[in-house]
Each structure stands twice: as C-alpha cells, then as structure tokens.
Image: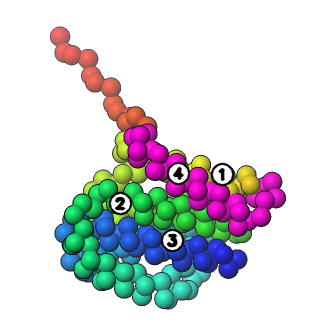
Amino acid sequence: MNYLIAIEFLAVIVSAIYGVLLAARKGMDVMGVFAVSFAVAFGGGTLRDLFLDRTPLFWVGNPHYPVIVLGIAVFSGFLVRYIGRIRPLLVFPDALGMALFTLTGTAYAMDAGTGVFVAALLGVITGTFGGVLGDMICNEVPSLFTPSPLNATCSFAGAWVYLGMTHRDFLQPFALVSGIVVIVLFRLAAVRWNWCFPAVREPNPPPSP
C-alpha cells in the first residue's frame, strides 16, 4: 500500500498546482489561491472518504498535506505572476492530478469491499470533484457539467483499465501506472481535438400561429 500513499501524495501536489493556476486566472490574493488549491487538492478525496466511511479523512490523517498545499499556494502564487498565459498550462496538472486521484480512489474503494462499478464511480468522484469545487469557488460553471473536452469519461476509462488489469492478476503497481497513462493521454487528446459530448437542450417550442 506504500505506493498508493506515494501516488496520493503526488496527486495532492499536482492538484494544488492546478488550483494555483486556476485561482491566478481570477487574480485572487494568496488566501484565495490557498482556498482554491485546498478545494482542488482535497475535495474529491474528501467525498470519497465520506462515502466509504473512512476516518479520519485522508488529509486529516496526513496533517502534512494541508501544510504542503499552503506552501505551494504561497510560493507558487508569487511566481505565477511572471507566467504570460496561464490557460494553456492548466491541462497538464489537470490531467495528471485527475489520473492520480482517480486511481487511488478506485483502489481504496476496492479495498473497502465495493463492487467494481461503484469503485470506478468513486474513482471518478475522487479524480474530478476537486476541480468542480475549484470552478465553483472561482464563480464558473464547472467544466465537468458543460459541453467541453471529455473529463469524467477519461477518468472512468482509466479506472476500468485498472480494474480490468487487476482482475487479470496483473501486478497492482503496473495496473495503476497503466490506468494513469490512459487517463492522461485520453484527457490530453480530448483537449487537443476537442472531443466532447453534445449539450442536452430543451427543444425549441413551435412558432405560435
């Protein structure tokens, strides 16, 4: 299980960096940057732990996590002002953080005895809902719920790659890495070629006579 802890630790760092970039687009101060970074880094994992009744919450049981996020928010918050264009950078920590958290969430759900479909769903929640909270704090409609490059679908696909490989008795570290690679490449491709689902809209009413 040590490799899961290592992956989760890396996920916290990468997601916090994504939160810094997200907050910087809105011109927030250091406390705003910390709030967004905190939400992105811990939001999805907190929901996972609540659904699985895992106590203490993963960031409460690892009290150095919030301290690290604060350090990233303060340090990166000063550096990010020297970056000319932030938007093109968002996709990289977004994709990697989502992948890392998705696979740890799926693995923890399986360890808790859930079914494979529920484990995949909890992996998606772990990997994506931190970004949803970050968007909400930044007063934006979460991209997860709008016609935008595939997000949760990438997470879901990677979770099933991991579950399928563990079912076939592949070594768990190899299955974890494979799922992470699938999510990252799928997400980057979705952004590059704008793969998205169409919006579901109410049909236009017929013209009145």
Gap in angstroms between the C-alphas marked 2 and 4: 15 Å
Q: Residue at label 3?
A: 11
In the displayed structure, 104 sits above or below 35; it is above
Q: Give the label, 4 or 3, closer to the camera.
A: 4
Query: Can residue 182 be seen from the camera position used here?
Result: yes
Q: Nearer the viewer, residue 114 or 152?
A: 152
Q: Are marks 1 and 4 in contact (CB under 8 Å)?
A: no
Q: Residues within 10 Å of mark 4 (few under 14, many from 20)?
A: some
Q: Which mark is residue 90?
A: 2
- For marks 1 and 3, the one nearer the N-term is 3
What is the span of residues highlighted in magenta in the rendered image? 166-195
Residue that appears at 39% across and 57% down: 91
Q: Which mark is residue 160?
A: 1
Residue that appears at 54% across and 66% down: 101
Q: Residue at label 4?
A: 185
Amino acid type, callout 4: Leu
Quarter of the image that includes the N terminus: bottom right
Residue that appears at 22% across and 64% down: 84
Q: Residues within 10 Å of mark 1 (few under 14, many from 20)?
A: many
Q: Are marks 1 and 3 in contact (CB under 8 Å)?
A: no
Amino acid type, callout 2: Leu
Q: Secondary structure at mark 1?
A: helix
Q: Secondary structure at mark 2?
A: helix
